Amino acid sequence: MNRSWKVLLENELDTQNDTLVSHTMTEEEYNEVFDIGYGGTNGCSFTAWGEKYVYFPLCYDGAEWVGSAPRNPSDEKLYHQGGG
């Protein structure tokens, strides 16, 4: 399955009802389509900031997706990220 960080990040932003403020990727890295399935990490490293959350790449057994954590201290508890 092929996706870009742009698509994956926008999906996570929608899930969190958040708006992107900034990220560390070049436009090429942001839009690059890569295999998010099993087979190693293919997407670049990044950090992204929304108004409410911070976003980062996750990988487990070669599958890649975007994780998020609250940008500010809160009572929100995070589930275990990265598979297991």
Image (tube, rainbow, N blue to C red):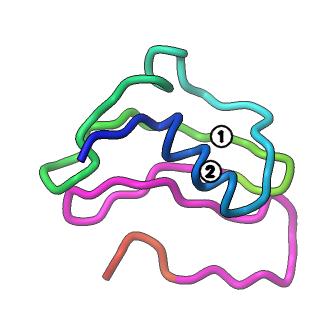
**Marks 2 and 1 close (CB-CB < 8 Å):** yes
Q: Is residue 33 above or below residue 42?
A: above
Amino acid of disc 2:
Tyr
Tell me if residue 59 is in the magenta stretch.
Answer: yes
Instruction: Label 1: state its secondary structure.
Output: strand
Q: Residue at x 49, y 46 (%)?
A: 8
Give the numbered dot on residue 55. Answer: 2
Q: Nearest the camera: 36 or 68? A: 36
How crowded pointer 1 is (Cα within 10 Å; few <14, some 14-19, many 20+) is rated as some
The quadrant of the picture occupied by the C terminus is: bottom left
Q: Quadrant of residue 83?
A: bottom left
50 displayed left or right of 42: right
The spot of residue 9 in percent (x, y) is 57, 45
The residue identified by callout 1 is 48
Q: CA distance from mark 2 to mark 1?
A: 5 Å
How crowded pointer 2 is (Cα within 10 Å; few <14, some 14-19, many 20+) is rated as many
Highlighted range, magenta: 55-79
